[in-house]
Image (tube, rainbow, N blue to C red):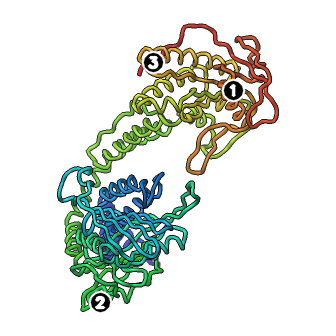
């Protein structure tokens, strides 16, 4: 007999039918459960690395501030080295002492600054044990010193009153600057150096010195100077302790040979250079990589406690910065918070599922409107973009982001030739590096004596004048179909015939030159009444072949032109100063112009950088009412 299997199959299929809502619910719940499980597992791993991340940031902060601390000594030494006159002895040493006093007063991180020459003469300004200017002269194997003691900062008063000498001591010592470590290392290496720690002669404390060797030429010949700045290890210890205690854990600074320079986990100041002893630092120093390592992170377990460890090397000195922190101190209650957070997420899952079904209906419509706004932004149509209102915070954020993008592009449009970008996009040009040969008319403008004007006019007034000057120029250039290629200080480079073809480009450029001079004359007349300097402008125009296109680096492009034509136009503009003219054009431009504008032949004139002379013409200015000047 035949079997009848379909009947029970149909019955089973009918029982398995569910509605779409159930399918979506089961699917979302299954995916959410999977994501929550994976998220919990991942969060546990993230928590394990969170402490290292926090500690690494704190270590980097301490390192950056130590570098900045040492850079103060470098900056002061470089400032002294850059002084036009720096003398360690003699009548000329008084200004040098005043300069060094001022530098030391403005740099509380330093303990002393000084300069010495190859004749064993030395001028030193020191803060401890008492502010003083120390004059050292060594002759015939003996050293004479004069100490001019000053008022300490705690006495108050201004810098002038504190610099007044309170008393003077004369001393005979055996101090020899030429035998000191800082002098020998600087002169021996011929470049700036950080010394190894040593005992300072004046302060009788351990410290380090940054020294720069100099060669100075005088009427008596060339002589050697060494300028230097001192930092005591006590000051460095205070600094490391201060910034280490502002974050997590402790820090220590080791010399290139592994001896302790400063540490925050022990009170006091190192009185001698010795390897680390006791506590975490001793175990850590034995575990971390040597001074040749660039940067490393490790863990250390000591007495049942886990520590996170960071080490890095300061390239300028070869010192190693170590920092460590107990792992549980950084993590705190993060692990418990993660567990509680995922438990709460499960409780809200059902509610969020229901809300998501309703929210989906409210997303599509505003997203489409946002997409239309994004397309308008892509076409640089930034005016009157409609705002999209939605109850969803993400939609509001996206709408706000697009609005901010539009405002940012509107501001950026002031710095780039937007018309050029639109023309290139309309012509289908890819905005990548490209170029093609074209026949263009190129104009250069420049303000005579601008350097003197810039030196004599206050910056706000100069900016105001330049803004009005460029506004007037931009308006005239746009009226005549020119493309403003670039601002070069006070100069302009303008193209006619690119990126869009322009009929009779030489004529348009020459008419623009005449209108530019009329506009500038109107500005200068107004400025003369206000007692402001005039911007006398020279213009040069040349027509010829160029390579025009989108040129530049991979990450920064500009539409411009290059070639001999551009160089010649610039050289023609330069000739105005020699010939006393205001507008000069080349013979090629003159032939294209014909008799449509008045010109005067100048003749063949040699151009800088060219072997052959060039026929140039003066473009005479037609008298006409000046164009309106843009308001300030």
Count all numbered tags in the image, as a single digit. Answer: 3
Left or right, residue 140 beside residue 353: right
Residue 172, picture quadrant: bottom left
Separation of disc 2 and disc 1 at Cα?
A: 77 Å
Q: Crowdedness of circle 3 by 10 Å Cα count: few (<14), some, many (20+)?
A: some
Residue at 53% x, 33% y: name it.
451
Q: Which residue is mark 3?
A: 527
Instruction: Choose the circle earlier in sequence order: 3 or 1.
Output: 3
| Residue at the bottom extreme, as displayed | 303
For the residues labelled 3 and 1, say whether their Cβ atoms are less than 8 Å apart: no
Q: Position of residue 39 (x, y in %)?
A: 32, 71
Q: Position of residue 550 (x, y in %)?
A: 63, 41
In what element is the residue under mark 2? Answer: loop
* Near-viewer residue (197 or 257): 197
Instruction: Choose the circle earlier in sequence order: 3 or 2.
Output: 2
* Near-viewer residue (392 or 615): 615
Q: Position of residue 245 (x, y in %)?
A: 23, 72
Residue at 45% x, 30% y: name it.
456
Separation of disc 3 and disc 1 at Cα?
A: 26 Å
Q: Which residue is mark 1?
A: 575
Residue 278, picture quadrant: bottom left
Q: Position of residue 422 (x, y in %)?
A: 56, 34
* Near-viewer residue (543 or 549): 543
For the residues labelled 3 and 2, say whether their Cβ atoms are less than 8 Å apart: no
Separation of disc 3 and disc 2 at Cα?
A: 76 Å
In what element is the residue under mark 1? Answer: helix
Q: Crowdedness of circle 2 by 10 Å Cα count: few (<14), some, many (20+)?
A: few
Q: Which residue is mark 2?
A: 277
Residue 18 seen from this side = no
In what element is the residue under mark 3? Answer: helix
């Amino acid at each position: 007999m035949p079997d009848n299997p379909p009947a029970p199959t149909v019955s089973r299929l009918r029982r398995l039918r569910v509605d779409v809502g159930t399918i979506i619910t089961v699917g979302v719940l299954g995916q959410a459960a999977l994501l929550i499980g994976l998220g919990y597992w991942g969060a546990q791993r993230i928590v394990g690395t969170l402490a290292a991340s926090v500690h690494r940031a704190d270590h980097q902060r301490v390192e950056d501030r130590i570098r900045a601390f040492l850079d103060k000594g470098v900056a002061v030494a470089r400032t002294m080295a850059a002084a036009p006159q720096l003398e360690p002895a003699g009548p000329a040493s008084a200004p040098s002492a005043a300069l060094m006093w001022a530098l030391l007063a403005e740099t509380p991180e330093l303990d002393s600054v000084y300069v010495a020459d190859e004749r064993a003469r030395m001028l030193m300004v020191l803060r401890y044990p008492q502010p003083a200017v120390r004059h050292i002269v060594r002759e015939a194997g003996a050293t004479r010193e004069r100490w001019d003691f000053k008022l300490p900062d705690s006495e108050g008063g201004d810098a002038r009153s504190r610099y007044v000498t309170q008393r003077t001591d004369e001393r005979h010592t055996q101090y020899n600057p030429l035998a000191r470590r800082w002098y020998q290392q600087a002169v021996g290496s011929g470049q700036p150096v950080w010394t190894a720690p040593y005992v300072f002669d004046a302060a009788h404390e351990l410290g380090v010195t940054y020294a720069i060797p100099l060669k100075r030429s005088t009427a008596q010949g060339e002589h050697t100077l060494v300028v230097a700045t001192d930092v005591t290890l006590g000051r460095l210890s205070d600094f490391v302790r201060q910034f280490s205690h502002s974050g997590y854990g402790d820090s220590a600074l080791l010399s290139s040979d592994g001896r302790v320079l400063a540490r925050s986990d022990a009170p006091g100041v190192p009185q001698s250079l010795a390897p680390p002893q006791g506590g975490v630092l001793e175990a850590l120093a034995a575990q971390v990589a040597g001074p040749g390592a660039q940067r490393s992170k490790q863990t250390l377990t000591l007495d049942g406690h886990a520590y996170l460890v960071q080490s890095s090397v300061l390239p300028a000195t070869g010192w190693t910065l170590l920092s460590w922190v107990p792992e549980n101190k950084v993590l705190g209650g993060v692990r418990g918070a993660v567990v509680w957070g995922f438990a709460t997420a499960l409780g809200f899952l059902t509610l969020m599922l229901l809300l998501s079904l309703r929210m989906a209906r409210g997303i599509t419509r505003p997203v489409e409107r946002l997409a239309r706004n994004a397309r308008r932004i892509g076409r640089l149509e930034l005016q009157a973009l409609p705002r999209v209102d939605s109850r969803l915070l993400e939609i509001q954020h996206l709408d706000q982001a697009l609005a901010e993008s539009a405002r940012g592009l509107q501001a950026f449009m002031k710095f780039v030739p937007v018309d050029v970008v639109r023309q290139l996009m309309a012509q289908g040009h890819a905005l990548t590096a490209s170029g093609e040969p074209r026949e263009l008319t190129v104009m250069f403008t420049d303000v005579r004596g601008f350097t003197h004007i810039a030196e004599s006019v206050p910056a706000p007034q100069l900016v105001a004048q330049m803004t009005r000057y460029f506004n007037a120029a931009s308006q005239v250039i746009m009226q005549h179909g020119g493309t403003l290629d670039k601002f070069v200080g006070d100069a302009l480079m303008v193209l006619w015939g690119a990126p869009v073809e322009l009929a009779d480009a030489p004529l348009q450029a020459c008419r623009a030159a005449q209108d530019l001079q009329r506009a500038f004359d109107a500005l200068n007349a107004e400025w003369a009444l206000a007692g402001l300097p005039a911007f006398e402008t020279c213009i040069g125009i040349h027509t010829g072949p160029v390579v025009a296109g989108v040129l530049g680096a991979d990450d920064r492009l500009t539409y411009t032109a290059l070639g001999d034509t551009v160089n010649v136009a610039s050289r023609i503009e330069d000739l105005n100063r020699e010939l006393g003219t205001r507008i000069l054009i080349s013979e090629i431009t003159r032939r294209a112009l014909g008799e449509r504008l008045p010109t005067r032949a100048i003749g063949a004139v040699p151009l800088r950088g060219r072997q052959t002379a060039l026929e140039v013409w003066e473009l005479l200015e037609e008298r006409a009412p000046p164009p309106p000047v843009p308001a300030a």
